[in-house]
């Protein structure tokens, strides 16, 4: 979230999501106001994250009921940007699920460790159904991506729709952003929303330094 926030808001509005998992949200001067402006322009509300999660952010529509939310700071590695998770447990209709927005390290060993911490956090949240979205800084054949895909369902692989590659917007050639779900969540489609009504190629290129990933999911009703 470093480029054209008006274009970003237009893309989010066109996608009309229940949940939006953002990375590189405002973290510095008046960051809460900047998050509130983005949420309002996108037709959403802020749930958790931003500076308190070192960048990851969760936004939601008013269709979503938030049961609890927590920002998790990960161990700091000297010389590297500190990372964190924005997490929440929400209800959408009759479905209850855990949600995690993440942005993993550029450094391979730290990134792999953070992948394990993400899986541990999901387990600690204690919900049978979960969705994780974020910038993994890793490709599908990488160790961290595979570590997550071994335990979770890679939504693009399960039901590809739209575009595959997320980086860079000007020259998409790699998939380093992904959405994962726990088993039991049905993926109806997942990919970069090229051609979705209201989503223009210009806005996709201008909005951020990565292309967005949109997933349509069916989550079983909770008891």
Image (cartoon, grey):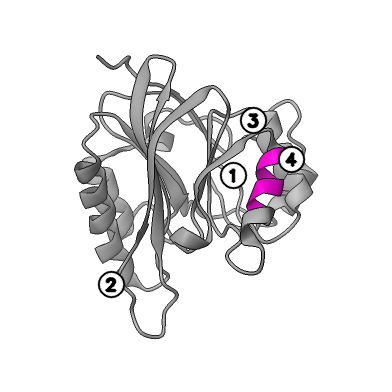
Q: Which residue is mark 3?
A: 15
Give the side of residue 151 with respect to residue 153, left or right.
Answer: left
Q: Which residue is mark 2?
A: 109
Q: Which image quarter holds the N terminus?
A: bottom right
Mark 3 nearby-residue class (10 Å; few <14, some 14–19, many ≥20): some
Q: Which residue is mark 1?
A: 212
Q: For residue 195, say whether it is visible.
A: no
* 171 w.r.t. 153: above or below: below
Could you give the CA–CA distance between mark 2 and mark 3, rounded to whole angstroms?
A: 35 Å
Q: Earlier in the sequence, mark 2 or mark 3?
A: 3
Could you give the CA–CA distance between mark 2 and mark 1, rounded to whole angstroms?
A: 26 Å
Q: Earlier in the sequence, mark 1 or mark 4?
A: 4
Question: Residue at the spot x=71%, y=47% of the render?
Answer: 37
Q: Contact, CB < 8 Å: mark 2 with mark 3?
A: no
183 or 89, which lies in front?
89
Could you give the CA–CA distance between mark 1 and mark 4, rounded to whole angstroms?
A: 17 Å
Q: Nearer the viewer, mark 4 or mark 2?
A: 4
The numbered disc on residue 180 is: none
Mark 4 nearby-residue class (10 Å; few <14, some 14–19, many ≥20): some
Quarter-wise, where is residue 83 in the image? bottom left
Residue 63 point in image, percent of width and height: 54, 22
- Chain part drawn in magenta: 35-41
Could you give the CA–CA distance between mark 4 and mark 3, rounded to whole angstroms?
A: 13 Å
The numbered disc on residue 41 is: 4
Mark 1 nearby-residue class (10 Å; few <14, some 14–19, many ≥20): many
The kind of secondary structure element at disc 4 is: helix
């Amino acid at each position: 979230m470093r480029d054209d926030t008006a274009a970003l808001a237009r893309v989010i509005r066109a996608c009309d999501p229940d949940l939006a998992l953002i990375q590189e949200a405002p973290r510095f001067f008046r960051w809460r106001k900047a998050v509130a402006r983005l949420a309002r322009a996108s037709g959403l509300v802020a749930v958790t994250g931003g500076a308190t999660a070192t960048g990851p952010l969760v936004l939601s529509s008013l269709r979503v009921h938030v049961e609890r939310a927590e920002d998790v700071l990960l161990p700091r590695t000297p010389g590297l940007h500190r990372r964190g998770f924005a997490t929440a447990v929400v209800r959408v209709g009759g479905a209850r699920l855990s949600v995690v927005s993440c942005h993993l390290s550029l450094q391979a060993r730290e990134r792999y460790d953070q992948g394990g911490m993400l899986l541990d956090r999901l387990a600690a949240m204690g919900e049978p159904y979960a969705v994780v979205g974020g910038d993994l800084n890793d490709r599908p054949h990488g160790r961290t991506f595979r570590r997550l895909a071994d335990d979770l369902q890679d939504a693009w692989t399960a039901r590809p729709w739209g575009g595959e590659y997320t980086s860079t917007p000007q020259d998409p050639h790699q998939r380093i952003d992904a959405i994962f779900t726990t088993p039991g969540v049905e993926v109806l489609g997942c990919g970069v929303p090229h051609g979705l009504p209201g989503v223009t190629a210009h806005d996709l290129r201008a909005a951020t330094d990565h292309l967005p990933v949109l997933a349509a999911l069916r989550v079983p009703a909770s008891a």
